Image (cartoon, rainbow, N blue to C red):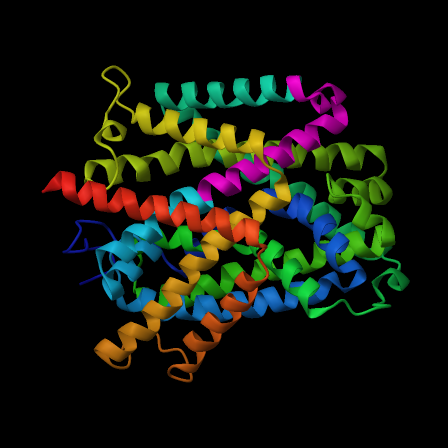
Amino acid sequence: MSDSESNSDEGLIRTIGPKALGTNIFNMVVGAGIFVLPGYVAAQLGSAALVAYFICAAAVALIFLCYAEIGSRITRSGGSYAYIEDAFGKFPGFIASTLLWFGWAVFSDAAITIAMVETIAIAVPLLNDPVWRVVFIVALFSFMAYTNVVGVKSGIRFAMFNTAAKFVPLALLLIVGLTMINFDNLAITEMPSLENIGAGTLLLIFAFSGAETALNTSGEFKNPARTVPLGLLLGMGSIFIVYLGLQTVAQGVLGDGLAQNTEAPLAAAAEIVFGEWGATLLLAGAAISIFGTLSGDILATPRVIFAAARDGNLPGVLGKVHPKYKTPHMAIMLYAFAIGAIALSGSFQTLAVLASGSILLVYAGVSAAALKVRLRDGDPKEGEFKMPGKFIIPVLSCALISWMLYQMTGEEWLGLIIFLAVSTVLYVVQNIVRK
């Protein structure tokens, strides 16, 4: 079958190549997290924060080698969910999809909502008042839910503006900031404990996650055996370079002060590099980027909820279509409500860790699925990507993920366990109802 022909299994056109996939990965991953995480990681690890980036990069490399192999072998749409379901069956696939749309999407969106409010509050102190914060968040998600129920065109147009809004200020800070680094600020005076490094890495995985979402369109990849590994290498490699550079600039410019700037660390660095207008640019870029991310997620993720409801995996009411606007209005309203409610009840760091824990469980499932498919179907065939070392990489990936998950507190684990228990009950109930 040629690249331009449709996929016989799904009726989709295979038009996405490595550059398009790599660009999409970069756009989806580089977002709200990098605007605030440098300060949080520095607060955890001090000048040794860069160590967590390298550990995180190693973990991501192992994880996405597993993605590259299994993504070249299982080419239907669905990404992580499709890989886990193919390897382990419908129930693990259901848990993976729930972890993706709620454990990852809702928790991460709630976390960046808090980051956005704290960023705006620097310019509008009124938002530091709990009452006004509630009013702002309720109004924000009411507005976004309404605009997405009415239609999708505005959301698509805003995504283009958001890409430029987040990339331009980050690129300016990275390029100019590298010339203004005080290298004494980069010296590691005291190596943090392994426990603190693990906690910092767990938090940092929040900013590296999201590439798996780009693989949901795997049914539309040209030559998946080439597109998946090259696209992942281009996307994640460029992300690591940008993140490492921004952490270096922030640490090199602010020194010990970086750990004190958890609300807007890059804006604080930009103020020193460019002056007051630089801080304003980064603050505006962060707020617009986060708003754009939320808008994009409220546009896309409710469609996953809608599809799951139509398939009988979620309550049928979530599969309803608005009679006038022809949008999945119930799914949109549920998703917007869930983000707003959780944002009002949590802190950025707690929600970021819960989101990281959820996505790490999915990553562990995909790594295990790559191992299972190798055992079941043998080594990849000609034309499929083959990661080196046979079983070594999936085993190392699962081990490193387990180490990062071990850094979660008992309270954080309790939250994830309750979530998984509720998901299991929902799956059982849905199956009983279908019978």
Q: Nearer the viewer, residue 407 or 37?
A: 407
Q: Which residues are magenta?
A: 105-131
Residue shown at 47% from the left, 19% from the top: 142
Q: Nearer the viewer, residue 291 or 223?
A: 291
**Percent position (x, y) of residue 60?**
52, 65
Q: Is residue 25 left or right of residue 347?
A: left
- Say which quadrant the N terminus sits in: bottom left
* As drawn, 115 above or below 371: above
Furthest toward the bottom, the residue is 389
* As drawn, 400 above or below 314: below
Observer able to see residue 167: no
Q: Nearer the viewer, residue 225 or 355?
A: 355
Observer able to see residue 416: yes
**Percent position (x, y) of residue 304?**
32, 40
State whether the magenta stretch is mostly helix, strand or loop.
helix
Residue shown at 87% from the left, 60% from the top: 185
Q: Is residue 77 left or right of residue 339?
A: left
* As drawn, 298 above or below 100: above
